[in-house]
């Protein structure tokens, strides 16, 4: 049986009258009301560590963002200048959490604690070569536990450009969809922001 992601992706292919250079995207907004209630999960293998990058350099953050997000066509922060990006990642309420596998960066998530009503995961991804083997599920559980310290609802969003298992992974951890919508996303491969052969699961915008 086709998954929600697969069904939605097929529907997106049929959308008409998109602006030139834009991709059809469906986005799901998810919420976990009690993140502290998630069961802890043992590490899938030895040598894993999750460490906050306090006030990371622009170069290190761009390495994480570019490497983890390229295949999923993350273009928003690639287009930002260094000064604009520094204001975001230098905020004490933005926590950049890096998963290391025997000393090598394997993934990261960006936790947003700027709101007094909820916590938010801005970005969440593994780096190429580390997808599979349970690291995504492990890192997500660690992210939920980390957010649970505030005892506030945790929100995030995903879309049809993301990994095909992302939506199901979030649902398995107790997240529920509270809103969803169709969007149009400017294809960053067309202006050189991202290489043209990235995101092979998504055809280039027309």
Image: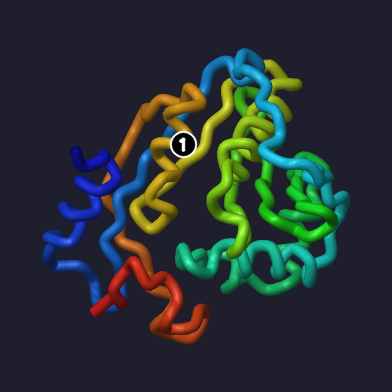
Q: Is residue 50 visible?
A: no
- Which residue in the structure is indicated by mark 1? 169
Quadrant of residue 146 within the rendered picture:
top right
Across and down, in percent, residue 182 comes to 26, 49
In percent of the image, x 84 and y 56: which residue is there?
A: 103
Structure colour scheme: rainbow
Whole-percent x, y for residue 63 in the image: 71, 69
Q: Nearer the viewer, residue 162 or 115?
A: 162
Residue at left offset 73%, top offset 72%: 82
Local SS, label 1: helix
Residue drawn at x 43%, y 54% is 162
- The image quadrant that residue 37 belongs to is top right
In the image, farthest residue toward the right: 54
Name the residue nearer the viewer: 51 or 16.
Answer: 51
Neighbour tally class for label 1: few under 14, some 14-19, many 20 plus, Cα within 10 Å: some
Q: Is residue 130 left or right of residue 51?
A: left
Front one among 171 and 117? 171
Which residue is more in the foreground, 87 or 44?
44
Q: Tell me: residue 38, above or below residue 30.
A: above
Whether residue 189 is visible here, answered yes or no, is: yes
């Amino acid at each position: 049986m086709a998954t929600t992601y697969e069904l939605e992706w097929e529907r997106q292919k049929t959308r008409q009258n998109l602006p030139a250079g834009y991709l059809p995207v469906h986005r799901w907004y998810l919420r976990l009301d009690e993140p502290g209630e998630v069961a802890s999960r043992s590490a899938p293998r030895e040598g894993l560590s999750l460490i906050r990058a306090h006030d990371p350099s622009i170069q290190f953050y761009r390495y994480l963002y570019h490497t983890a997000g390229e295949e999923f066509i993350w273009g928003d922060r690639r287009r930002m200048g260094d000064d604009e990006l520094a204001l975001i990642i230098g905020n004490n309420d933005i926590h950049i959490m890096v998963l290391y596998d025997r000393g090598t960066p394997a993934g990261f998530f960006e936790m947003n604690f700027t709101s007094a009503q909820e916590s938010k995961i801005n970005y969440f991804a593994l780096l190429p070569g580390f997808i599979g083997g349970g690291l995504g599920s492990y890192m997500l559980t660690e992210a939920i536990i980390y957010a649970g310290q505030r005892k506030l609802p945790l929100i995030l969003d995903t879309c049809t450009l993301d990994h095909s298992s992302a939506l199901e992974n979030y649902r398995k951890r107790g997240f529920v969809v509270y809103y969803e919508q169709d969007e149009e996303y400017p294809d960053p491969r067309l202006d050189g922001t991202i290489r043209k052969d990235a995101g092979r699961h998504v055809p280039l915008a027309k």
